[in-house]
Amino acid sequence: MPRPTLRLITTFGLGTLRPAPGTWGSLPPVVLAALLMAVGLGPDQSPWIFRGVFAVMLVVFSWACVRDADAAEARFGRKDPSEVVADETAGQCIPLLMLTGTVMTSPALAAASLLYAFFAFRVLDIIKPWPAFMLQRVPGGWGILLDDLFAGFYAGLLLLMVVYGTQA
């Protein structure tokens, strides 16, 4: 497996960290969201830039997962190896794409929203609510990726309910 391919599918080596490589792989989008918000490129000030960054990340890491999963499974010797965290990186982008400008009404709400997005995604990725659990049976990279995309979508819906619930 070529080194650039290995870097991308392991999210620049985060998938090799222990414990909880999926958690490590979920961190980069959240850290990037915090940095974008801190420099004034959040979902309220620059929604096109903010969402564009996460849309590109979602596509790039999803593509890497689908394209390189078979090679990664051969390299690591098992199906859905824990070192492959491009799926977590992609999935974590979804709730961040769903953030609205209302989270920027205070720094505390912005930070709480990012933490909630992170923890909601991780919990839902671990428990795999319907149909995510069944999607793991899909062969190859799609089977690795799809459950994380559903977890990200569900986390985004929960995030929206919580954020709008605090605004009411």
Image (spheres, rainbow, N blue to C red):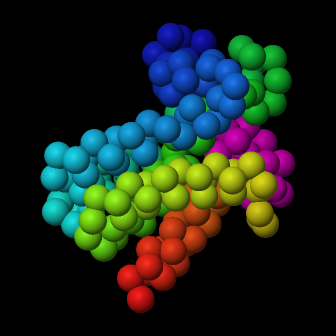
Residue at image point 65% right, 29% down = 21
Residue 115 in the image: state x and y as whole percent: 49, 53
Residue 109 in the image: state x and y as whole percent: 36, 64
* Image quadrant where residue 155 sits: bottom right
Residue at image point 78% right, 42% down = 139
Q: Magenta span has 137?
A: yes
* Image quadrant where residue 157 sits: bottom right
Residue 10 in the image: state x and y as whole percent: 57, 25
Magenta residue span: 132-146
Q: Residue furthest front?
A: 108
Q: Nearer the viewer, residue 167 or 98?
A: 167
Residue at image point 57% right, 71% down = 158
Residue 47 in the image: state x and y as whole percent: 23, 63
Quadrant (top left/top right/bottom left/bottom right) for the N terminus = top right
Q: Magenta span has 121?
A: no
Residue at image point 19% right, 53% down = 41
Question: For this view, does 58 lie left or right of residue 75?
Answer: left
